[in-house]
Amino acid sequence: MTEARKASSPRKEAMIALIDRIADSRDSWRQRNSYFNAEHERYLQFLIPKGLRVLDLGCGTGHLLAGLEPGHGVGVDFSSRMVEIARENYPDLEFVQGDAEDPALVARLGGPFDVIVVSDTIGFFDDCETALRSLHPLCTPDTRIVISYYSKYWEPVLSVAELFGLKMRQPPLNWLSSSDMGNLLSLADFDIIKRDWRQLVPRRLFGIGPFINRFIGTLPLIRRLSLRNYIVARPTPTEALGPLSVTVIIPCRNERGNIEPAIQRMPRFAEDMEILFVEGHSSDGTFAECERVRDAYAGEWDIKAVQQEGKGKGDAMRKGYHLARGDVLMILDSDLTMPPEDLPKFYNALVSGKGEFINGSRLVYPMESEAMRFLNWVANQIFSLLFSWLLNQRFTDTLCGTKVLRRRHYDAIAANRAYLGDFDPFGDFDLIFGATKLNLKVIEVPIRYASRRYGETQISRFSHGWLLVRMVVFAFFRLKAF
């Protein structure tokens, strides 16, 4: 690729001269601060799956890009000496010398990329908004921008560390808070997915640092004092996805009286719709009713009825996802406490691009009497706060049965299930945690929770409460304090 170099200002020229002079000592400084750098790299490995097309702006000597194990990796740095060392370190990756603020350079980078990493480089930009906006030609709607930077609160600490030779010398930088970076991303037409704060103690300190970072530094409010700020964003959607086919998956067990009403109340909100009943060994003739309804409405709806081999809603959902033919996959609980009439809202939120994982929430609007017991409501409110903190996205109701996503995103969740494991008998958390791990944009659709008209609830206050406690602990160790 053609070499390019453009200095936007005397400030940038001074930066390039300084970085060129200290480039040969860069790797020794990385080793001196090995814990900090290893933890930073490990968190980015958590955010960015292996094998993607990754662009690293401000790649230095190439270690971070190599650590992400990209399928195709391109690193850019304005220091010619840094790029020389990176090429020596990792000849299988592509490194380009040039200014990431140079539009001509950006145009020659190719792309599109799955992930664009801006690790500390935002501090070197002359015009952060313009630099971020120039990345759009390198993006698809699925591209993720991952920005990491030092906390503004740590500016005096890091200045003292440089003074005493504990940190590599840096030129004068932009000191931006997480809010500042979020505002710049919004101005540049990027949509923020989530934020996080890591490394309250950037030193090992004989094992004390890792303990504090895992169990104290991740706590609400305290984590805002951490050295590292992270933001994940995506290009702001500008166009609707267009008409997509839909499969509505209805897991059902002992719901005979709700099968036909589910079809009668189902709105036709897409041109191509499939309704898939997955029955779970009922004792009230539910499967026979599914088959009867399938045949009775054959001329009006594409209905299929199958029986699951295993047990539980999670098993039924996975079977439904495997058999579904639609581009959009929806779960509708067969008790119909989530009104089928609200499904178009979920579909519109997805195809408009507002969200990539659409979660229902029963806890916004007033609900019908007896729809949820008071203690259940209180517990759900508490857990909504916990899960919003654990997942770094808003979740007010993790157990609402209606969840909507595209097939290809479900396939990606299933392909990455090894990290989280097959742990969830109800299926809700498998999707929620998987969507969070893949940095999907989550949007919640409030619904009016109705009381059951047929049969008895299959929710146990204590067993489901214990499940939520288990999921909080699981999420803490797998998604927060890992």
Image (spheres, grey):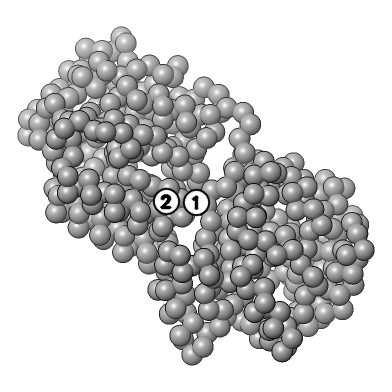
Percent from the top left, x then y, of residue 31? 66, 84
Residue depicted at 19% across the width and 47% down the height: 376
In the picture, which quadrant includes the N terminus? bottom right
| Spatial CA span between label 2 and label 1 | 6 Å
Tell me if label 2 and label 1 are in contact, CB under 8 Å.
yes
Instruction: Give the left or right position of residue 352, taking residue 101 as reference.
Output: left
Residue bearing mark 2: 434
Structural crowding at the residue carrying mark 1, measured as other residues with C-alpha within 10 Å and reported as few (<14), some (14–19) or many (≥20):
some
Residue depicted at 26% across the width and 49% down the height: 380
Percent from the top left, x then y, of residue 461? 14, 49
Q: Amino acid at mark 1?
A: Leu
Residue depicted at 82% across the width and 79% down the height: 22
* Up-down relation of residue 350 to residue 77 (above or below): above
Instruction: Give the left or right position of residue 369, taking residue 31 as reference.
Output: left
Figure label count: 2
Q: Amino acid at mark 2?
A: Gly
Percent from the top left, x then y, of residue 318? 32, 42
Percent from the top left, x then y, of residue 306? 24, 31
Residue depicted at 26% across the width and 60% down the height: 470
Where residue 240 sits, quadrant-wise, is top right
Where residue 67 sits, quadrant-wise, is bottom right
In terms of secondary structure, where does tag 2 sit?
Answer: helix
In the rendering, which numbered label is found on residue 438? Answer: 1
In the picture, which quadrant includes the C terminus? bottom left
Q: Is residue 86 visible?
A: no
